[in-house]
């Protein structure tokens, strides 16, 4: 395959509908986009050029490691791909101080990467929730909606009762603390339903960027479409019982709720905790570095 030049990639991004001056979240698998002039850095340059100096570029930047405290200056983000793991390291890019971090550069970057709760990674008070409130766009480049974090925001807003038990190790007032929480999560494969829903409503644009398929829609369109379907069918994004261990695990919390058990919605201290039960679980207390 021929190596695409940066100028061609910029033209492709504009052609698929990336707005100058807007807020743009990008989820990408570079292997599907390559070869591109400059590699991952070339793609980041093209994205920045497409949104221009008044635009804000946002990428996932979460930790892959639940067993050690997150450090925004050193913790890698390997599972989100080489572009995301390159992006947060660049000069001028801000990264939120959370194992569920997002990174951003541009005029809205500080607002987007401000502190956010540990135990509700993708609610309205999170980087992805703030992008939604800013009427940002979401670009899926070489990946499908199963990689689209904004759909977890829709699940949070819908108040779905399913989730999976998660934990992380964090420093709270200098003490290593194990935090357990229930996160709205599952295998996410059925997020692919968004393709047909958004396409039917004319809310999604398709194109090619580099050599990879691109989908673009406003975060608001994604959330509002998902909310309509979640209101009709709470478990529309979960696999049918018995097909998928992650979706089964999420379903199990539904029956727990039906039995009257409260699903934890706040961080609660684990066995090693040295904090009071009223701790709000937020980072930014200066203890993490
Ligand atoms: Zn599943």
Image (tube, rainbow, N blue to C red):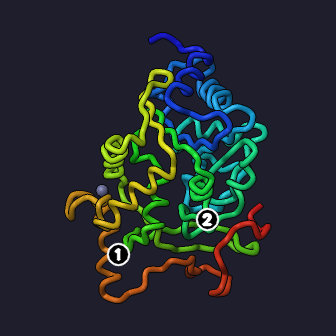
Cβ of mark 2 under 8 A from ligand 1 = no
Q: Which residue is outermost to the bottom?
A: 260
At x 52%, y 32%, the residue is: 17
Return the residue at label 1: 253
At x 51%, y 18%, the residue is: 35
> In the rendering, at what x and y percent does residue 141 appear?
48, 34
- Residue 125: mark: 2
Image quarter hosting the C terminus: bottom right
Q: Look at the image and tell me whether residue 187 can be seen.
A: yes
Quarter holding residue 281: bottom right
Callout 1: helix, strand or loop? Answer: helix
Q: Nearer the viewer, residue 240 or 138?
A: 138
> In the rendering, at what x and y percent does residue 252 appear?
30, 73
Q: Nearer the viewer, residue 29 or 218?
A: 218
Q: Which residue is outermost to the top?
A: 2
Above or below, 18 against 88 in this view is above
Q: Which residue is outermost to the front?
A: 201
Quarter holding residue 112: bottom right
At x 42%, y 85%, the residue is: 262
At x 72%, y 48%, the residue is: 109
> In the rendering, at what x and y percent does residue 183 appear?
47, 67
Which of pointers 1 and 2 indicates the residue nearer the eye? 2
Above or below, 215 against 232 in this view is above
Callout 2: helix, strand or loop? Answer: loop
Q: Earlier in the sequence, mark 1 or mark 2?
A: 2
Give the image quadrant in which the ligand numbered 1 is located.
bottom left
Q: Look at the image and tell me whether residue 99 can be seen.
A: no
- Report the side of 189 relative to 94 (left or right): left
């Amino acid at each position: 395959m021929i190596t695409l030049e940066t100028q061609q990639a910029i033209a492709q991004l504009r052609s698929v509908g990336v707005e100058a001056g807007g807020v743009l979240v990008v989820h990408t698998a570079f292997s599907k986009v390559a070869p591109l002039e400059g590699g991952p850095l070339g793609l980041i340059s093209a994205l920045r050029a497409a949104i221009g100096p008044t635009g804000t570029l946002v990428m996932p930047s979460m930790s892959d490691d639940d067993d050690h405290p997150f450090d925004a200056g050193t913790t890698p983000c390997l599972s989100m791909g080489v572009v995301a793991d390159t992006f947060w390291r660049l000069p001028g890019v801000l990264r939120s101080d959370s194992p569920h971090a997002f990174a951003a550069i541009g005029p809205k970057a500080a607002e987007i990467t401000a502190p956010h709760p540990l135990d509700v990674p993708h609610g309205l008070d999170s980087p992805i929730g703030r992008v939604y409130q800013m009427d940002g766009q979401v670009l899926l480049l070489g990946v499908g909606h199963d990689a689209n974090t904004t759909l977890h925001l829709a699940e949070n807003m819908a108040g779905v009762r399913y989730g999976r038990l998660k934990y992380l190790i964090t420093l709270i007032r200098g003490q290593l603390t194990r935090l357990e929480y229930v996160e709205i999560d599952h295998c996410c494969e059925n997020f692919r339903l968004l393709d047909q829903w958004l396409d039917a409503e004319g809310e999604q644009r398709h194109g090619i960027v580099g050599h990879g398929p691109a989908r673009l829609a406003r975060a608001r369109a994604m959330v509002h479409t998902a909310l309509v379907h979640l209101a009709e069918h709470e478990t529309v994004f979960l696999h049918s019982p018995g097909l998928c261990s992650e979706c089964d695990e999420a379903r199990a919390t539904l029956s727990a709720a039906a039995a009257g058990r409260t699903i934890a919605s706040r961080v609660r201290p684990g066995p090693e905790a040295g904090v009071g039960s009223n701790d709000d679980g937020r980072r930014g207390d200066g203890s993490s570095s």
